[in-house]
């Protein structure tokens, strides 16, 4: 609310008349213009006399207008200013105290219709610059003056508050313009100004103070809430900061309006605190208590709470409570007590003597120390350590010897001959350390072990030394043989080092050179090629469908396949060539001294021929094919890095061209690789920039043809490239690991949309979400799904999570365990693209599945291909035998739908009904064909 939005008028007590006011004041008193305020009935205005000495804001009732709050300020002996008060009753309007009701003491100016100054009142002449002879010269921002003049010219009246020039510099004024017609149809303008500069400054200062208080409130390190008592004594929360909500694991909006009893362990604790705290609070006394409270999930924790009443004079304003989470502190204190008890037990039952000294006097010792030196319990407390040294000189020497290491924070160790209480000698091994090396006055700890018997043994050992020397000669002969054994061991060690070196340069699985040895050989081959000016070629080989084999049959079978591939590649190279394994299913061949592309093509044909025979894995015949990229020196690069990079780019082009083929590098492939890298970089930012969106493809009941669900499908709307196919970016997301964050986003968005549809009445609708392998592998995934269900309030049975057949067979045992956790929540689980993988029926029946989705490749030709028809019929029959539902995807014709209906398929989706749709169009379909 600004100053010109508030009603303000000046009231002359002696005349019982309003002598000045703004447009808002005119509206209050029922007149059209401020200059008509003087005509208001004096009997009505006389009622203002009752409020002239009011110390607090008060209500004025203007009949048909609602009541409004005002405050008064005395301007002179007879003139008072009435100003409307809004949200801040403490805001006082500070005005120029020299103003009065007479024109001789007001800032009044008269201008002609061209804006030229004609005359000024005496007070205006004193307060306003002489040079301001034009109307617009009054304004710091002349554009504001032009706008106000135009408004006055149209309506005969205008007002506002502006920064204007005065003899004291720029100040805020309320300005009123009134147009009056003079002779010859020309007109004059009267300008009235009221200084409100101090009011504006106070208003700005208050707003800044309120903003600062709000920042402190929202970002305080402790929880703060305001509570008001109600008639039912619920003590409701009317406001709290984020820290307060975080302490109790709520959101702020969840707490507002709630009874504070939800924060207590039980209603009894709530009542007890009320009985204890609120009588003191009503007296204005600060209340402090340490007590257990309850989080949203029901767990209890320790808090330190402080409460105070906002105003003892106005109890209705409520109370402020400050809460600190001290749960960790309390637990730490309890843990410290346990540790101290344990330390005391160690001290009391240790097998060595332990004594604490301060200024070389005993502050504490354990029972074992007292027993070693023959003292009674507690007898040594406060006594000097001098008593267990044989002489004064020994005692001083010991103190001097230990001082330096103790002051440096080091451990002092020594063997000393000491004295028991009865004077008998005792040999001790002592170990000491300062409690605080920087302040030795804090004392030290000494651990003492009785080694008297050991010392006696040392004497006996010395006597045996002579016998030992006699035996040395005999042992010398034995050492000669040992030297021979040592030589043998050295030779064996050298052989072992050679084996280690071989392992460092070769792949452990296939025995082929690894990346390190490949780079070394390629560097040497390039050096020879440059010297002799011949060509060499680098072939980058990647296995097609290897990931599918690895995921379905397991890593062991995958490793066996890689060993067989290594053998087959080795068969096609020459003696001077190299075949190496980079890792995974990537291999590299370096061909030396080649005669041209004809020789390279021959090697490629040999590789492809060697790959044609099947590989027997897990009692199955598996077929793999290679995608080959070729880079030639010197045309495609002169360094190992360039040749490897360009051969890799050519290999990716071979995969994109249909796999099981070879491609030579050219510059356009380099551009393709750069495009791939660019796409990867853009993908890293797409989620943060909100470039993803979800489309939904309806899923329908085969019998009734009603919508029963929708599959959420992600789309990437790139700002420059437009819509990017999921086939282009999903593989990149899986390789980079971004698929986990993207998948989480899809799960949240789909659940949020499902909640929206349920609010619109579609409470039987389900939504399917596709999962990635990386999501399922996360230990916390089941908890994440549960949190999403709870956050959006959707029924578990309405969420359907889809996994591909190959994905569920990857690490089958681990996948079963992960899916069991999700299924136990009540979530539906479906197998996508069923029939395209290698799943085993023995595994399939163990998975917690609800639905199989027939792959579109089988549905496409179901009406013309008997094999596809039989596959679909078999899948449906098998699913029913396993108590699973079936949904067919890719249904595009009525003939396909009829055949699926005859086979007993329950659900379908496809272009026959609708392609994937934006959420708005999907909602239109729901409204047109409700799923209820």
Image (spheres, rainbow, N blue to C red):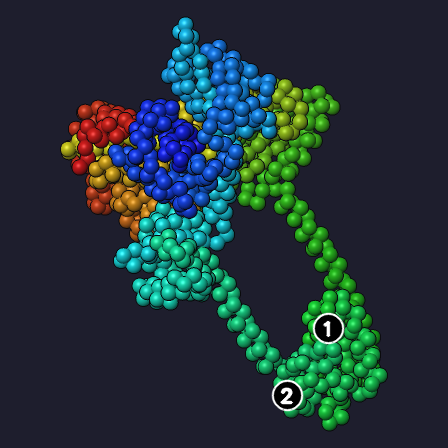
* The quadrant where residue 717 appears: top left
Q: Quadrant of the image for the N terminus?
A: top left
Q: Quadrant of the image for the C terminus?
A: top left
Q: Residue at x 51, y 22 (%)?
A: 121
Q: Residues within 10 Å of mark 2 (few under 14, many from 20)?
A: few
* The quadrant where residue 281 appears: bottom left
**Looking at the image, is mark 1 or mark 2 nearer the viewer?**
1
Residue placed most toward the observer, 752 or 469: 752
Q: Which mark is residue 441?
A: 1
Where residue 545 sits in the image (x, y, percent)? 43, 34
Where residue 114 sits in the image (x, y, percent)? 48, 10
Q: Residue at x 57, y 37 (%)?
A: 582
Which element type, helix, strand or loop, lies under badge 2?
loop
**Camera sees residue 913:** yes
Q: Residue furthest bottom?
A: 422
Indicate whether 186 appears above or below 28. Answer: above
Where residue 335 sits in the image (x, y, percent)? 51, 68
Residue placed most toward the observer, 653 or 312: 312
Identify residue for label 2. 378
């Amino acid at each position: 609310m600004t100053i010109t939005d508030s009603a303000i008028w000046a009231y002359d007590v002696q005349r019982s008349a309003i002598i000045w006011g703004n447009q808002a004041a005119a509206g209050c008193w029922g007149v059209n213009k401020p200059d008509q305020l003087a005509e208001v009935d004096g009997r009505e205005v006389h009622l203002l006399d009752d409020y002239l000495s009011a110390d607090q804001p008060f209500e004025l009732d203007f009949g048909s207008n609602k009541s409004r709050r005002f405050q008064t300020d005395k301007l002179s002996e007879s003139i008072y200013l009435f100003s409307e008060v809004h949200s801040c009753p403490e805001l006082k309007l500070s005005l120029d105290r020299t103003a009065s009701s007479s024109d001789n003491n007001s800032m009044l100016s008269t201008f002609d219709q061209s804006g030229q100054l004609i005359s000024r009142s005496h007070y205006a002449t004193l307060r306003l610059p002489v040079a301001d002879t034009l109307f617009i010269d009054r304004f710091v921002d002349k554009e504001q003056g032009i706008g106000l003049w135009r408004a006055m010219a149209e309506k005969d009246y205008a007002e506002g508050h502006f920064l204007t020039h005065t003899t004291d510099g720029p100040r805020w004024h309320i300005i009123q313009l009134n147009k009056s017609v003079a002779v010859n149809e020309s007109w004059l303008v009267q300008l009235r100004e009221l200084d409100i500069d101090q009011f504006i400054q106070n208003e700005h200062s208050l707003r800044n103070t309120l903003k600062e208080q709000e920042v402190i409130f929202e970002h305080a390190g402790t929880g703060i809430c305001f509570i008001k008592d109600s008639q039912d004594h619920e003590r409701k929360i009317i406001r709290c900061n984020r820290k307060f909500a975080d302490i109790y694991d709520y959101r702020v909006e969840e707490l507002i309006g709630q009874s504070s009893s939800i924060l207590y362990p039980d209603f009894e604790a709530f009542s007890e605190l009320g009985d204890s705290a609120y009588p003191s609070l009503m007296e204005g006394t600060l209340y402090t208590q340490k007590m257990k409270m309850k989080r949203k999930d029901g767990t209890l924790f320790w808090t330190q709470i402080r409460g105070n009443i906002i105003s003892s004079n106005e109890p209705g304003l409520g109370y402020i409570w400050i809460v600190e989470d001290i749960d960790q502190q309390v637990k730490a204190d309890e843990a410290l007590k346990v540790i101290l008890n344990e330390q005391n037990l160690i001290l009391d039952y240790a097998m060595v003597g332990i004594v604490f000294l301060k200024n070389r006097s005993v502050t504490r010792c354990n029972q074992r120390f007292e027993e070693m030196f023959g003292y009674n319990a507690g007898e040594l407390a406060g006594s000097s350590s001098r008593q267990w040294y044989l002489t004064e000189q020994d005692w001083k020497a010991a103190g001097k010897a230990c001082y330096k290491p103790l002051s440096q924070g080091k451990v002092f160790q020594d063997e000393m001959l000491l004295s028991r209480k009865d004077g008998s000698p005792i040999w001790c091994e002592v170990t000491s350390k300062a409690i605080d090396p920087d302040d030795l006055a804090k004392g030290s700890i000494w651990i003492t072990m009785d080694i008297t018997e050991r010392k006696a043994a040392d004497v006996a050992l010395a006597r045996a030394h002579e016998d030992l020397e006699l035996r040395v000669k005999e042992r010398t002969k034995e050492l000669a043989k040992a030297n021979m054994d040592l030589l043998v061991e050295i030779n064996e060690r050298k052989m072992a080092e050679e084996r280690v070196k071989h392992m460092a340069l070769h792949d452990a699985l296939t025995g082929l050179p690894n990346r390190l040895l490949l780079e070394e050989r390629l560097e040497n081959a390039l050096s020879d090629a440059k010297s002799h000016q011949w060509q060499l070629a680098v072939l980058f080989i990647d296995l097609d469908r290897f990931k599918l084999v690895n995921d379905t049959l397991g890593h062991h079978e995958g490793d066996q396949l890689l060993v067989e591939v290594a053998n087959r590649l080795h068969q096609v190279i020459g003696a001077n060539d190299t075949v190496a394994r980079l890792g995974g299913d990537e291999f590299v061949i370096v061909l030396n001294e080649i005669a041209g592309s004809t020789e390279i093509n021959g090697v490629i044909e040999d590789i492809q021929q060697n790959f044609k025979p099947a590989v027997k894995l897990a009692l199955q015949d598996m077929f793999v094919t290679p995608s080959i990229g070729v880079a030639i020196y010197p045309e495609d690069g002169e360094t190992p890095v360039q040749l490897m990079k360009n051969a890799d780019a050519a290999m990716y082009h071979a995969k994109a061209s249909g796999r099981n083929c070879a491609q030579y590098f050219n510059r356009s492939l380099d551009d393709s690789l750069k495009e791939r890298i660019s796409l990867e970089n853009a993908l890293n930012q797409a989620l943060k920039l909100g470039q993803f969106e979800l489309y939904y493809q309806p899923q329908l009941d085969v019998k009734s043809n009603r919508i029963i669900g929708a599959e959420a499908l992600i789309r990437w709307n790139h700002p420059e490239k437009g819509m990017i196919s999921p086939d282009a970016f999903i593989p990149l997301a899986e390789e980079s690991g971004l698929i986990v964050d993207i998948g989480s986003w899809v799960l949240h968005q789909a659940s949020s949309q499902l909640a929206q549809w349920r609010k619109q009445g579609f409470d039987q609708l389900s939504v399917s979400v596709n999962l990635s392998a990386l999501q399922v592998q996360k230990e916390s995934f089941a908890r994440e799904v549960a949190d999403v269900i709870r956050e959006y309030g959707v029924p578990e049975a309405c969420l359907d999570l889809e996994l591909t057949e190959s994905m569920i067979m990857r690490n089958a045992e681990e996948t079963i365990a992960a899916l069991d956790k999700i299924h136990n929540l009540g979530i539906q689980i479906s197998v996508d693209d069923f029939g395209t993988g290698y799943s085993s029926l023995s595994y399939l029946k163990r998975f917690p599945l609800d639905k199989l989705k027939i792959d579109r490749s089988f549905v496409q030709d179901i009406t013309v291909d008997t094999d596809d028809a039989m596959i679909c019929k078999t899948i449906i029959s098998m699913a029913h035998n396993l108590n699973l539902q079936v949904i067919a995807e890719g249904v595009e014709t009525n003939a396909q739908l009829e055949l699926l209906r005859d086979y007993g398929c329950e659900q379908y989706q496809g272009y026959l009904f609708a392609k994937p749709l934006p959420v708005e169009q999907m909602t239109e379909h729901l409204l047109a064909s409700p799923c209820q």
